[in-house]
Image (cartoon, grey):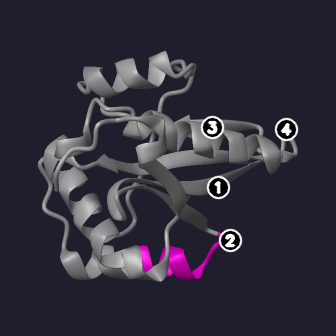
Amino acid sequence: MTPFDSKPGDLAIRPARDGDAGLLVEFNRAMARETEGKELPVEIVTAGVRSLLANPGHGFYTVAESAGEVVGSLMITFEWSDWRNALFWWIQSVYVHPDFRRRGVYRRLYEHVRTRAREEGACGLRLYVERENAVAQGVYSALGMHRSGYLLFEEMLTG
């Protein structure tokens, strides 16, 4: 991949298509490796990506393209809020190819998703970030997100 010159017109944001599945799998595995030092099994991630693409009720992927090449992506999943009678959109699986970082790719993806969420009546956007990932936290803050008052607890029921 070769970096684009970051003019706004050089980047297209679009919904992911079935043909993007292989690259989304690569991006997800690279993100896990970079941020958490985890090697995700390709067959499980492939099944997960294909399942989301086939089930839009679970969420969707949005991709950024430069010169016809996908250079970044993020996934949205949904959380129903009975307190707000609306959906939160959870931003997950964010990845920008290293050659395209610090050039506004994530900003454009985020702005696109935020606009779409407003148009579709979502009550908010949420994401989780590793405590030690100060760079990502700075990016999210600069886009208008703030640290919530909630802590995340979990109990893993499978692998």
Marks 4 and 3 sit apart, C-alpha to C-alpha, by 13 Å
Residue occupying image coordinates x 55% and y 54%: 76
Residue occupying image coordinates x 27% and y 20%: 134
Of mark 1 and mark 4, the one earlier in the sequence is 1
Q: Is residue 74 left or right of residue 118?
A: left
Of mark 2 and mark 1, the one earlier in the sequence is 2
Marks 2 and 3 sit apart, C-alpha to C-alpha, by 17 Å
Give the class, few, some or many, for how many residues have Cα within 10 Å of label 1's Cα (few <14, many ≥20).
some
Q: Position of residue 11 (x, y in %)?
A: 43, 47
For label 3, the SS is strand
Of mark 1 and mark 3, the one earlier in the sequence is 1
For label 2, the SS is loop
Residue at the spot of label 2: 57
Residue 40 lies in what quarter of the image? bottom left
Residue at the spot of label 4: 84
Label the magenta part by its dominant secondary structure: helix
**In the rendered image, the vertical position of residue 138 relative to residue 78, given as above or below:** above
Q: Is residue 154 visible?
A: no
Marks 2 and 1 sit apart, C-alpha to C-alpha, by 8 Å
Of mark 2 and mark 3, the one earlier in the sequence is 2
Question: What amino acid is labelled 1 in the image?
Answer: Phe
Which quadrant would the N terminus be assigned to in this image?
A: bottom left
Q: Which mark is nearer the camera, 2 or 4?
A: 2
Magenta-colored span:
48-57
For label 4, the SS is loop
Marks 1 and 4 sit apart, C-alpha to C-alpha, by 14 Å
Task: Tell me if label 2 and label 1 are in contact, CB under 8 Å.
Answer: yes
Task: Specify whether residue 52 is painted magenta.
Answer: yes
Q: Position of residue 108 (x, y in %)?
A: 49, 39
Residue at the spot of label 3: 125
Residue 28 lies in what quarter of the image? bottom left
